[in-house]
Image: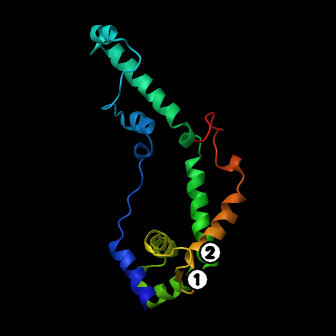
């Protein structure tokens, strides 16, 4: 009954909000939203700034330079194929839920409460957030904390290592970053 209540509360309280490209990086914000409120002129001398301030050409140059700087500083993030990463993360969560045998718990909760609908992904997402991420964030000993008889930290760590170590890097990168990871 506890799991059924948990999944039911997930559907009552859940408010999904998509992530907009402009929230991911500064250059996306500049390009997608045309948001240049915080650009910094790093390339003109004080005399050039004084002479050109407010002109269309000056503002264009400052915006372009600042956007190019943002692209350079966010190169590692931008090198990832984010749609593919989203698919892979969903596959990981689904694989983990099968290994932890959450499918059976979610299916029985949905059968006992038809108002939940039949979208298992919602139940998986809720269990992942509450029982895995919540355990890792708040348990006094996250590696050995158990949910439904499974040590969440150890089990998820093992599955995650195995899943992501088998992925070819070429599947998730648009291009290799020219900067070293710091």
Residue 61, position in %: x, y?
40, 18
Q: Residue at x 66, y 70 (%)?
A: 158
Quadrant of the image containing the N terminus = bottom left
Q: Residue furthest front?
A: 140
Drawn side of residue 96 relative to residue 70, left or right? right
Residue 144 visible, this orientation: yes
Task: Please name whichever residue, 60 or 117, is drawn nearer the observer in this view of the structure.
Answer: 60
Task: Please name whichever residue, 114 or 82, is drawn nearer the observer in this view of the structure.
Answer: 82
The Cα atoms of the two marked residues, 2 and 1, are separated by 7 Å
Residue 115 visible, this orientation: no
- Looking at the rendered structure, the secondary structure element under dot 1 is strand
Q: In which quarter of the image is residue 143?
A: bottom right
Residue 142, position in %: x, y?
51, 74
Q: Name the residue under label 2.
A: 155
Quadrant of the image containing the C terminus = top right
Check whether the beta carbons of the residues at disc 2 and disc 1 lie within 8 A of each other: yes
Task: Please name whichever residue, 96 or 12, is drawn nearer the observer in this view of the structure.
Answer: 96
Q: Quadrant of residue 45?
A: top left
Residue 59, position in %: x, y?
33, 19
The colour scheme used here is rainbow
Q: Which residue is drawn at 58% across and 75% down?
A: 97
Q: Mark 1 points at which residue?
A: 150
Drawn side of residue 63 relative to residue 119, left or right? left
Image height check: is 174 above or below 58? Answer: below
Image height check: is 77 above or below 99? Answer: above
- Looking at the rendered structure, the secondary structure element under dot 2 is helix
Q: Residue at x 28, y 7 (%)?
A: 51
């Amino acid at each position: 009954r506890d799991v059924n209540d948990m999944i039911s509360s997930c559907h009552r309280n859940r408010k999904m909000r998509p992530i907009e490209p402009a929230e991911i990086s500064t250059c996306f914000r500049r390009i997608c939203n045309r948001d240049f409120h915080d650009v910094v002129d790093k390339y003109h001398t004080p005399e050039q700034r004084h002479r050109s301030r407010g002109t269309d050409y000056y503002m264009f140059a400052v915006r372009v330079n600042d956007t190019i700087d943002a692209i350079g500083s966010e190169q590692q993030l931008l090198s990832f194929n984010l749609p593919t990463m989203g698919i892979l993360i969903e596959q990981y969560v689904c694989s983990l839920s099968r290994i932890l045998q959450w499918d059976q718990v979610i299916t029985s909760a949905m059968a006992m409460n038809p108002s939940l609908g039949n979208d298992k992904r919602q139940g998986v997402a809720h269990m992942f957030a509450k029982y895995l991420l919540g355990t890792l964030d708040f348990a006094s000993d996250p590696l050995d904390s158990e949910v439904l008889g499974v040590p969440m930290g150890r089990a998820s760590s093992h599955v995650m290592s195995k899943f992501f170590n088998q992925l070819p890097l070429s599947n998730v990168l648009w291009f290799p970053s020219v900067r070293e990871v710091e």
